[in-house]
Image (cartoon, helix red, strand yellow):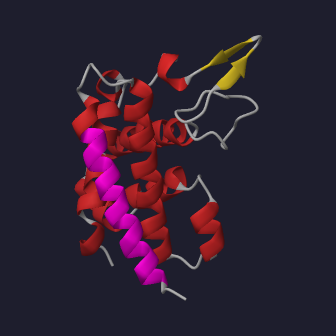
């Protein structure tokens, strides 16, 4: 049976690959926002799994099969001593960053078909019913499609990038 470290290493490699593709597609007008957001959702889900495999005792099967955990991970990441130290003396800014990033993280998690499908069926992978019509993700105008225009969106992307970049540096 593979070790938790082996799982964590595989998840961080895949997260970085998904992130790279997200970054490449993000500014292209010829790519559906559903595809762009799908790669962001996949990158963030795998990023959280990498850290959680490495740093927690969560059950392996639960980690592999669950599509939620990124918001929880981000709260812990933003609450880490390293991040808190970066905002020393700027508590109001730190609280705003944490609030905005966690709000976006939850919205990104909800793009997975199996998360909150009853109340929010819109997702980036599979068509869903909307009354009598069926909506394909490529035809849907996702409200958070352009993170660069959302409050805290650019900051959120910087935080995700930092979590990916700093993975090996963190204990």
Q: Quadrant of the N terminus?
A: bottom right
Name the residue located 28 percent from the left edge and 44 percent from the top edge.
21
For residue 159, above or below residue 14: above
Quarter residue 47 falls in = bottom left
Q: Nearer the viewer, residue 149 or 142?
A: 142
Q: Nearer the viewer, residue 98 or 107?
A: 107
What secondary structure is the magenta-colored segment mainly?
Answer: helix
Instruction: Report if residue 123 is visible in the image.
Output: yes
Q: Quadrant of the C terminus?
A: bottom left
Instruction: Report if residue 142 is visible in the image.
Output: no
Q: How many marks?
A: 0
Name the residue located 49 percent from the left edge and 38 percent from the top edge.
108
Q: Which residues, given as a range, are shown in magenta?
A: 4-23
Q: Nearer the viewer, residue 163 or 115?
A: 115
Q: Hey, which residue is sitting farthest top in the picture?
A: 132
For residue 68, above or below residue 25: below
Name the residue located 31 percent from the left edge and 48 percent from the top edge.
19
């Amino acid at each position: 049976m593979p070790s938790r470290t082996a799982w964590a290493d595989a998840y961080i490699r895949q997260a970085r690959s998904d992130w790279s593709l997200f970054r490449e597609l993000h500014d292209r007008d010829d790519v559906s926002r559903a595809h762009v957001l799908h790669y962001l959702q996949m990158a963030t889900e795998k990023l959280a799994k990498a850290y959680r495999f490495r740093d927690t005792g969560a059950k392996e099967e639960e980690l592999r099969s669950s599509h939620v955990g990124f918001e929880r991970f981000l709260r812990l990441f933003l609450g880490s001593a390293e991040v808190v130290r970066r905002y020393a003396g700027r508590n109001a800014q730190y609280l705003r960053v944490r609030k905005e990033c966690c709000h976006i993280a939850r919205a990104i998690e909800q793009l997975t078909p199996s998360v909150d499908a009853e109340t929010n069926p819109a997702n980036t992978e599979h068509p869903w019913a909307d009354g009598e019509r069926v909506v394909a993700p490529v035809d849907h105008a996702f409200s958070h499609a352009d993170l660069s225009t959302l409050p805290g969106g650019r900051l959120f992307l910087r935080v995700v990038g930092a979590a990916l970049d700093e993975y090996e540096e963190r204990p």
